[in-house]
Structure formats: structure tokens, C-alpha cells
Image (spheres, helix red, strand yellow):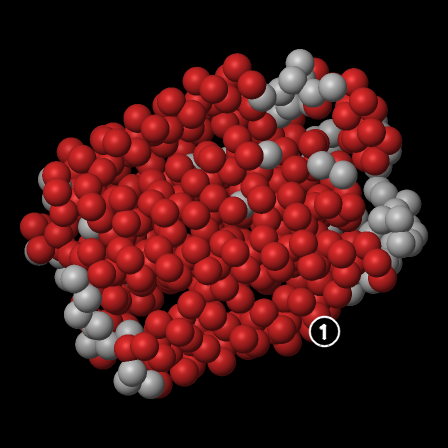
Amino acid sequence: MSYVTIIMFINFVDRIIISAATGPIMEEFGFSATQWGLILSAFFWGLVPFAFLSGIAADKWGPKKVWNIGVTWWSIFTIATPFAFNYVTFLIARIFFGAGEGPTLSNGIRVISNWVSPRETSTAASVVFLGVKLGPALGTPIIVWIIATYGWRVAFYVMGVMGLVWLFGWLRIFTDSPADNKYMSKEEKAWLAKEQGDVVSANISDKPSFKELFSLPKEVRKTLVTNLFSGFCFGYVLYFSMTWLPGYLTMELNMSLKTMGTVIMVLWLFAAFTSVIGARILDKLINKTGNRRIWGYWQSASFLIIGICMFLAGFVDSVLLILVFLTIAISANTLAESCINSVIPSIAPERAGSQAGLLQLAYTVPGIIAPIVTGIIVDMTNSFSFAFFLIAILVTIGSIVSLLFMRPSKMDVKGTEQIKPIIINH
């Protein structure tokens, strides 16, 4: 799991380089906020279709092969990005870079499904996706220092090489099945096989993800569809934060590049800590009570906190209060994430790759929308306040939907579903 966390870290550092370099690049090329929003969004134009396709590929061919291709591709285009010389070439570079990062979420969830006991999915998801928070937290100050010292182009070169170094270790260490891994003891393999039961031996369906989703029982389907909308809300907050937050701190709050890097580090470190602790609490609550409806209550409360904090951040004038509200909001978003990512491995483990492809689609479509909408709002109003208000409205809707429609089956206190897991044989 820790090795997958590392690639999540590299992946999300790669993503935030361009956001950290907002000021220098916009100044060098004379981009408007709307143009810059489109450039930030272009990454997701490539990511969205390949996120969906890579989820199906992970089920058919395994996460190892899919990540071999993805990491190689995105590392090459990370290195290629500094060669962009105008608006159009930046768009092209970001689209191809995004395509390479398509496997990130779906492969992560497929690995969790293959390698983790169903009773520990929330904790495992928080560990795997810890890199999503640590990337901005630890990576931003380093990237900012590289930009300030050597220029923004060098930051892309360094991170592109790091991806290729990770790939070398991945090829040597990882296997799709724990049973094939020479670094895992026989006792560990036997224990995990017993924990997972017969689900992991299910044959893979050849149905497309959407068709497969709507062929599932109503109770499972309703929960998965609700989780997709929760993923959309989470994704909007996440990608607003990763694309425009550094620019907001420097453009509207007038922070220096180094101060901005420090603030981003503290904010995401706090979110990373909240994510791990929250996921552990969530697993304990569900395993103790056997009531997976806690997922709905958890998501609803998380989104409500985000809504309140985002509204207040757009309303107050105090820089300190704004930073406090933003920190709480982003930390609450990671609490929602720990729940969202655990739903699929828990109730549809035999379809983890394909259904995670749909979830990544729900996560990343907001990545297309949020940067563009925010850029337009900033150009029209000369302020980020209405961008915060829009987020508050969206997540409030998400809070209500999660509370009303997240209705998964219960399980006994040992972590076994009361309804037999769905296994489709051909």
C-alpha cells in the first residue's frame, strides 16, 4: 500500500506544479484569468475519458500493466510541458498529460480490492490516497523553492524523472494478486484469502461500466449512484483547491510565492492528518455497529461543514479567518473522501476497477468545470467570493442527497454483508 501512496504523492505533485507557477507563467505569457482557467481545465479533458477506460482495463488486465503505461506516459508529458510556448501548446501539453494520469483513482481502488480485507477498506483507502494530500502539502514548498530558485520549467523536469524512477521499483515489487507476490508470507496470504472469501475469484464481466451498474440490485445501485454524486461534490472542492487556491492566495490575498507555499503546506498537512484519523474512526464505527448507513451520515456532515466554511471564507475580510475556514473545509472534504473511496471495495469488490472508473469520472468532471467557472467569475467580478459561494451551494445539495439516498445493506459485527456479495459468473 505504501508504494501506491508514493505514486499518488508524485501524481498530485505533478498536478500542482502548474498551479504553483500560476504567477510566473501568467506574467510570462500574458494569459487572462479565463485563459488560465481553460489551461488548468485542459488537464481534465485528457483525464476524464481515460479515467473511465482505465477502470475497465484494470479489471481486465490488472492495475500493474495499466499503471506501467500511465506512469510512463504522464512522466514524459510532465517533462514535455516546459516546451509549450503559447496558449494552444499549453492546452495540448495539459491534455496529453491528463490522459496519462487517467488510471490513478481506478487503479488505486482496484489495488485496495485485491490486497485488503473488506473490514479495513476505509483505512486502506486513506493510506493509499494519503498521497493526494501529502502531494500538495509537502510538494508545494519544494516546488515553490525550485520555481523561485531555478525557474518554473525545472520543476516539471524534476517531477517527470521521479515518475520514471518510481516505475522501475513498481515493475520489480508489485503483483496484481497477493498470491503471486514473493515478498508476502504464506500466513499473510492465507489470512487475506480467508478475509476476502470468494469475491476475489469472481469472473470479470465484459459489460461496460454504465450497463453493469444498472444491472446491479436496486439497493446496491442506489448507493453507488449516490456515491457518484458525492464524488462529484468532492471533486469540485478538491480541484478548485488544487488549481486556483495558490492563485487566490497570491492574486487576492497578496501573498508572496514562498508564503503561499507555506500556507498550502500547512493546510494540506492538516487535511492529511484528518483523513487518516477520520478513516480509522469510520472503519471502527461500521465494524462495531454493522450499519453502513453511517456512510450517508458521514458524507452529509462533511459536506455541510464544507458549505458553511466556504460561505464564510467568501464573506469575511480577515486573512486569518479565511485561512482557518479554508483549512477546515478542505479537511472536511478529505473526511468525505475516506467514505466515498470505501464504498465500492465494500459492496462491489468484484467490480472495483470498472465501478471505480465511473467514480473517477465523477471525481474528475468537476476538474474540467471548476477551473473554467472560477476563471470566468474572477474576470467578471475581480474577486473569488462568488466562486466560494458556488461551492457552498453545491456541497449543501450533496449533503442532502447523501443523507436521503445513501442506503447500503447492513452487515454483521464481523464485517460480513447480510446480503450475499454479488458474483457474476460466465
Q: Position of residue 1 (x, y in %)?
A: 59, 34
Quarter of the rendering containing residue 302: bottom right
Q: Position of residue 85 (x, y in %)?
A: 11, 40
SS at badge 1: helix
Report which residue position mark 1 lands on: 404
Q: Residue at x 43, y 18 (%)?
A: 168
Quarter of the rendering containing residue 291: bottom right
Residue 339 falls left or right of residue 362: right
Reply above or below: 389 against 32: below
Kind of residue at disc 1: Leu
Residue 120 falls left or right of residue 198: left
Q: Residue at x 73, y 50 (%)?
A: 214
Reply above or below: 361 against 383: above
Reply above or below: 26 against 252: above
Q: Residue at x 76, y 56 (%)?
A: 284
Q: Position of residue 371 (x, y in %)?
A: 33, 60
